[in-house]
């Protein structure tokens, strides 16, 4: 790694990693972060206009090395990890990685499950053998273990509780093997959609997968910190072409107060499917007047068309925020 990329700041590295992971995985990460961290990362991701190949490789290499070091630590402790890391990458690099993982040196068994959402954790464990569940719950915080235990059928609850009560000692070898199997199963369900795209488009993709509540919270914060960025993101979250996905009754409601000339301008140059979508949700008389207006309008500036389209989009967004029509950030059809 060159000196230039070795000096990357932590927040820049985190932003690049989230971009490389792709919107769906990044959205999952967002759900485990506090608002301040989300705000910081969102601003940083928006600033990632491009990712150099060297930068990409540097971040992925560091993540890979840290994961390797953590795996060695989990297998046999600090001495074992140091020995393998020194063999793989030299003494200096081994010590650097172990320093970075200082906070992880005292981790308890199944620590990788501690940050999991309780509901996801329950779904992940409910198919396991009662003895396995008992072993895992005995090492988790009481509140998290209680959530999982409470989700089990009454008979299974008693069985698991009994096994925990009768549990005495477990050998390190059994714990390490159990952790290894579970981590392998968990990693099998996690995908990574690698991409070199960054900036505002990357933020929009993540927010589209994060749900409306997360989207609303982030945009409210960005309204105060960077209003221009917030507005740019809003414009891309729902585009004029996305109207094709709106159900007819919702579109009819959105078009009630739209000026005819403005609508004619907005429909200039759009796809035939989208134009028919509008016509289908208007009266025959209104369609005739709209077509006549479009014919008489002649050539128009692209900027004026985009402004007219954005007004209609803003109308739809305001109706959604008022609860008059509903749609999800994930791209589902609008419903009443």
Image (cartoon, rainbow, N blue to C red):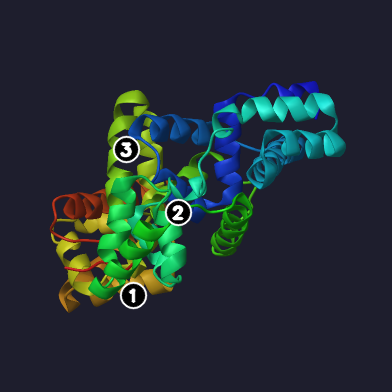
Whether residue 264 can be seen here: no
- Mark carried by residue 71: none
The answer to which image quadrant residue 281 occupies is bottom left
The answer to which image quadrant residue 271 occupies is bottom left
Q: Is residue 312 left or right of residue 24?
A: left
Residue at image location 45% in from the left, 35% down from the top: 42
Q: Please name whichever residue, 238 or 152, is drawn nearer the observer in this view of the structure.
A: 152
Q: Nearer the viewer, mark 1 or mark 3?
A: 3
Q: Which residue is mark 1?
A: 276
Give the Cα distance between marks 1 and 3.
Answer: 33 Å
Q: Measuring from the top left, give residue 30's x and y in whole percent.
A: 42, 44
Q: Which residue is mark 2?
A: 168
Label 1: state its secondary structure.
helix
Q: Measuring from the top left, give residue 125's x and y in whole percent.
A: 42, 65
Q: Please name whichever residue, 305 or 118, is drawn nearer the observer in this view of the structure.
A: 118
Q: Which class describes the residues within 10 Å of circle 1: few (<14), some (14-19), or many (20+)? A: few
Q: Quadrant of the C terminus?
A: bottom left
Give the Cα distance between marks 2 and 3.
Answer: 51 Å
């Amino acid at each position: 790694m060159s000196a230039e990329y070795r000096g990357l700041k932590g927040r820049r590295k985190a932003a690049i990693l989230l971009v490389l992971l792709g919107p769906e995985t990044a959205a999952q990460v967002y759900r485990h972060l506090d608002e301040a961290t989300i705000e910081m990362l969102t601003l940083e991701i928006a600033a990632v206009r491009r990712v150099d190949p060297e930068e990409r490789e540097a971040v992925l290499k560091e993540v890979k090395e840290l994961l390797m070091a953590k795996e060695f630590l989990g297998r046999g402790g600090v001495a074992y990890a140091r020995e393998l890391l020194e063999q793989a990458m030299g003494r200096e690099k081994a010590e650097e990685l172990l320093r970075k993982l200082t906070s992880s040196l005292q981790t308890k068994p199944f620590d990788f499950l501690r940050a999991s959402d309780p509901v996801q954790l329950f779904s992940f464990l409910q198919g396991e053998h009662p003895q396995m569940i008992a072993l895992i719950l005995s090492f988790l915080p009481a509140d998290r273990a209680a959530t999982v235990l409470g989700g089990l059928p009454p008979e299974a609850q008693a069985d698991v509780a009994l096994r925990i009560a009768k549990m005495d000692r477990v050998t390190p070898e059994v714990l390490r093997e159990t952790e290894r199997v579970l981590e392998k199963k968990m990693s099998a369900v996690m995908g990574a959609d690698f991409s070199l795209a960054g900036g505002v488009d990357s933020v929009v993709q993540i927010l589209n997968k994060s749900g409306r509540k997360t989207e609303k919270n982030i945009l409210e914060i960005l309204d105060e910190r960077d209003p221009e960025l917030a507005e740019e993101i809003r414009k891309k979250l729902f585009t004029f072409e996305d109207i094709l996905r709106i159900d007819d009754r919702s579109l009819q409601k959105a078009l009630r107060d739209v000026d005819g000339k403005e609508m004619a301008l907005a429909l200039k140059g759009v796809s035939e499917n989208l134009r028919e979508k509008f016509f289908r949700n208007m009266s025959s008389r209104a369609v005739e007047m709209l077509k006549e207006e479009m014919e008489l309008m002649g050539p128009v500036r692209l900027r004026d068309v985009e402004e007219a389209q954005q007004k209609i989009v803003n109308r739809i967004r305001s109706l959604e925020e008022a609860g008059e029509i509903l749609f999800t950030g994930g791209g589902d059809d609008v419903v009443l």
